Amino acid sequence: MALRAARRELLASPDAVSDPLLQQVERLCALRGIGEVSAWLYATEFFGWRAFRNRRQVAGLAGLTPTMRSSGELEREQGISKAGNARIRALAVELAWSWVRRQPTSVLTRGYRERFAAGGGRQRRIGIVAVARKLLIALWRYLETGVLPEGAVLKPNV
């Protein structure tokens, strides 16, 4: 409770306008489906300390890139690499579920529902990891350029 109060006090302070980290937190909190704790974690542990040049770097640092096994003529995908930050990867998957639920008009949500929602549990889990990767990249673009992810909605009180 004290941590939450301290965070809110930081966001309400006059320094929040000039601090890029606090600006990132505010922008992430403004999106429906992203809570205060998630916004702080993304800003402090992922987006706030590193400048990414492209989407591959964003997904790679989170460990959400596909891995291929290639041997002769055989090529097989082995899932995601899991080489990045495990906390961010877990948060990305959790936020993807929240996004699908709270952003029904988003392009990411519609794509997930069209391709994976009718499948079994395994298909839905595979699909949500894909949404997590795309959402992480969309949030990076949102923080860098200010352009909302396509179809995304802001919270009503913002």
Image (cartoon, grey):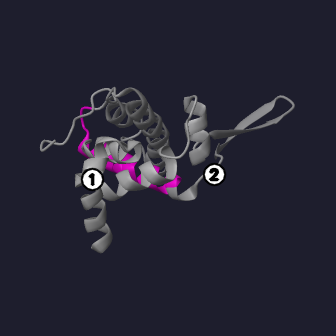
Q: 112 or 29, which lies in front?
A: 29
* Disc 1 residue type (three-letter): Leu
Range of magenta residues: 88-105
* Disc 2 residue type (three-letter): Lys
- Does residue 147 show up magenta in the picture? no
Of all residues, the one furthest to the right in this rendering is: 72
Q: Residues within 10 Å of mark 2 (few under 14, many from 20)?
A: some
Q: Is residue 92 above or below residue 58?
A: below
The residue indicated by pointer 2 is: 82
Observer able to see residue 33: no
Identified at 18% across, 42% down, the residue is 155
Q: What is the x, y in percent for residue 30?
A: 25, 43
Label 1 and label 2: CA atoms lie apart by: 33 Å
Q: What is the x, y in percent for residue 33?
A: 28, 47
**Based on the displayed image, in which of its 4 quarters is residue 61 positioned?**
top right
The residue indicated by pointer 1 is: 11
Q: Secondary structure at mark 1?
A: helix
Identified at 46% across, 42% down, the residue is 127
Q: Quadrant of the N terminus?
A: bottom left
**Based on the displayed image, in which of its 4 quarters is residue 6 positioned?**
bottom left
Observer able to see residue 75: yes
Q: Is residue 2 above or below residue 15?
A: below
Q: Quadrant of the C terminus?
A: top left
